[in-house]
Structures are given as C-alpha cells and as structure tokens.
Image (tube, helix red, strand yellow):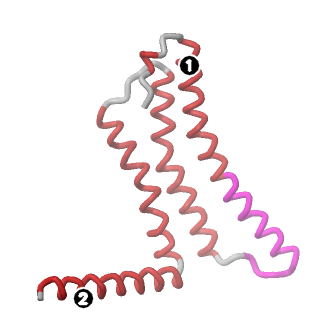
Amino acid sequence: KLNLTDLGDTTLKDWYLAAGGGCVAVPMLATIIANITLLVKVCNIRRQLGYALPNRGAIVTILWVCLAFFISYTPQFTDWVIEALGGVVPPWGILFLTYCLAINVVSNPVIYVLSNRRFKTFVYEMLRKWMSAATAATAIAND
C-alpha cells in the first residue's frame, strides 16, 4: 500500500484517496446494478415472449450473490472513507477487512452448491474423485 505521508502534497494525497474509494465503490455498485438489470431484462423478455418467468431459485441465487458481494466489499470502501477523512483504521479493522474480502471468494461456491442441484452434484463428484486420489496416494506412500 502506498505510504500517504510520503506524498507531501495534500491535493495528490486527496486525489489518491478519492481514486481509491472510487476504485472500490464504482465496480461494486456497477456489478450489483448490472446483475439486477440483467435479471429484470430477462424477466421482461421472457414475459413478452410468453414464457414463464425464471424460477424463484434463480432470482434468489442472484440476489444472494449480490448481497455477498456487497457485504464483502463495503468494509474496503469504508476503509477508504476513513482514510480520506484523515482517520486511521485500527489493526483489527484491517483484519476484519481481509476476512470480509474472503467472504466473496468463499460465498459464491457455497451459494451455488446450496441453490443449484447440478452444481452440487458436480462439486460432490469432484470431491469424491479428489478423496479417492488422495487415499490412493497415501496408500502408495505408506507401502
């Protein structure tokens, strides 16, 4: 991370903080808005063509993914706001921020396993194959 005290010029420091906040907030909001917009467009097109709307599970999955994304990136944005206002984020805040970013990485597969039967079957099959290979490798190593 760039040391802001070395920048010297307040305007450059302010620009750095504002750009950093924008680099977090803009993609976060764009992703959420794009997902919801696509969902609405799909629903409208399906309705116009006389097809049934997407099932409730698909809609709930998209909303859960958006919520997980929002929860995981909001602390990053808050960090930038605190620094832009001249505050200092405590060490526990940095740790919390790190764990929240990890939520996004972990949450998507969990959401898909819970909401999509085919994805769940695929994951279980991959885990079964991996466990079989690990067991075989352990047996060979022990011989």
Residue 20 lies, with reference to residue 46, above or below; the image says above
Mark 1 or mark 2, which is nearer to you? 2
Identified at 44% across, 69% down, the residue is 110
In screen coordinates, is 38 left or right of 118? right
Between residues 128 and 59, which one lies in front from this camera angle?
128
Q: Which mark is residue 136?
A: 2
Image location of residue 20, percent across then percent down: 55, 32
Q: Are marks 1 and 2 in contact (CB under 8 Å)?
A: no
* Residue that extends furthest to the right in the rendered view of this protein: 48
User: Which image quadrant: the N terminus?
Assistant: top left
| Element class at badge 1 | helix
Identified at 48% across, 11% down, the residue is 8
Residue 113 lies, with reference to residue 136, above or below; the image says above
Residue 14 lies, with reference to residue 130, above or below; the image says above
| Element class at badge 2 | helix
In screen coordinates, is 10 left or right of 4? right
Q: Main secondary structure of the magenta part?
A: helix
Region in magenta: 33-53
- Label 2 crowding class (10 Å Cα cut-off): few <14, some 14-19, many 20+? few
Residue bearing mark 1: 14
Identified at 46% across, 25% down, the residue is 83
Say which label, 1 or 2, has the lower sequence index: 1
Identified at 56% across, 33% down, the residue is 21
CA gap between label 1 and label 2 equals 58 Å
Which image quadrant is residue 4 in?
Answer: top left
Between residues 137 and 17, which one lies in front from this camera angle?
137
* Residue that extends furthest to the left in the rendered view of this protein: 143
Between residues 66 and 121, which one lies in front from this camera angle?
121
Image location of residue 136, percent across then percent down: 24, 88
**Number of labelled discs?**
2
Image location of residue 79, percent across then percent down: 45, 33
Residue 38 lies, with reference to residue 114, above or below; the image says above
